[in-house]
Image (cartoon, rainbow, N blue to C red):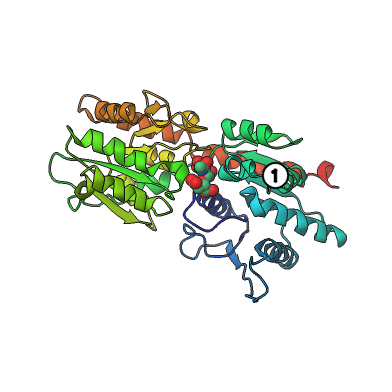
Amino acid sequence: MVCYPTFGGSGVVATELGKALAHQGHEVHFITYDQPVRLGSFRPNVFYHEVRIAQYPLFDYPPYELVLASKMVEVVRQQNLDLLHVHYAIPHASSAYMAKRILAEEGRHLPVVTTLHGTDITLLGKDPGFEPVISFAINQSDAVTAVSTSLRSDTYKLFGINKDITVVPNFVCPSHFEGLKVQDRSEFTQDGEYLLSHISNFRPVKRVVDVIRIFARLAEHTPSKLLMVGDGPDRSAAEREARDLGVIDHVFFLGKLKNPLEALAISDLFLLPSESESFGLAALEAMACSVPVIATEAGGLPEVIRHGVSGMLSPVGDVDQMAEHAAFLLDDAHLDRFRGQARKRALTFGIDRVLPEYLRIYNEVLSPETVD
Ligand code: GMT
């Protein structure tokens, strides 16, 4: 497994997939620059290999891609790995291609499975500086998966792709949610108040200022508080908006949390008004905690959230409609029903459905017909 070790969904998906494979008895090696956030404590069959770059004054830009490729080669040789599964095209798919070519010189076939997650396609795809390398690396992968139908279409639209892309949706591990300890929320809310939450990397694509606007409109008539979990470039803008709209005392900016599921578990509603979202893993995790979602119709969100069932969807930027939807869902006549439906919908994305699909893909690339 090659992934980003940070709080982003792609790293979470890679980590949980690796843990589930290890649990089944497969040996799983994580190759990345830091311990993946959700890897947790020691467990059988899981190994972590750190990619370290020496700092030289010559390097304005440290060559991570090259060091990663070398580390891939080293781990494949030493651990006799069967395949590489890389999450996020840049730079993981191109490093994997380089590792594959180096190992081919030694007569070793190394199949590469690339999973596309979203911003590697929808943001970087618009940057001509990346296009040739992304297209090439995707086309050279032995198998390519995307986390939603929407992302698959975007990939075909933005890149010159001649490979089949299989949609394998993101997933939740239901057991993580069953065992979740629900904390006392009295630190945040008083009796009769609702608790809303938002989790993201606070990048422009997440429209965190809209989160504040939706909340401020709702709070005009519905007693409520808001948890803002995460950090990133738009955090100051969101804090400023909360101050300008007079709701700063009702909004808790918690920063990055090691276990954001604890914030979801005490929430009544989750807000995700993104400009673009290939899947929206945070929304799925909210639903798995029985928390319905107010979101936009962007990208893959309609594939995850059923409008009027597990949450409600609006056009990007329509904060008035999203605030109306929030008020509707929080109405006592609806909330319990939506909570149950959200959980039920989330369970259709259980890992038991996705794991066999990845294993099928691994077996396919390992079969002799696909050997160069
Ligand atoms: O949400 C982010 O911007 C982080 C990014 C990542 O690479 O982790 O998330 C992308 O991948 C997630 C896991 O597949 C998806 O759930 C997110 O929707 C996707 N983000 C975007 O498309 C903006």
In this rendering, is residue 69 above or below 302? below
- Residue at 65% x, 48% y is 89
Instruction: Tell me residue 259's x, y (percent).
Output: 38, 55
Residue 78 can be seen in this image? yes
Front one among 177 and 161: 161
Q: Quadrant of the N terminus?
A: bottom right
What residue is pinned by disc 1? Answer: 131
Residue 368 sits in quarter: top right
Instruction: Tell me residue 28's x, y (percent).
Output: 61, 58
Mark 1 belongs to which amino acid?
Answer: Glu
Q: Secondary structure at mark 1?
A: helix
Front one among 205 and 294: 205
In this rendering, is residue 335 above or below 361? above
Q: Is residue 144 left or right of residue 255?
A: right
In this rendering, is residue 143 above or below 29? above
Residue 82 can be seen in this image? no
Instruction: Tell me residue 136's x, y (percent).
Output: 76, 45
Instruction: Tell me residue 64's x, y (percent).
Output: 65, 64
Number of dots carrying numbers: 1
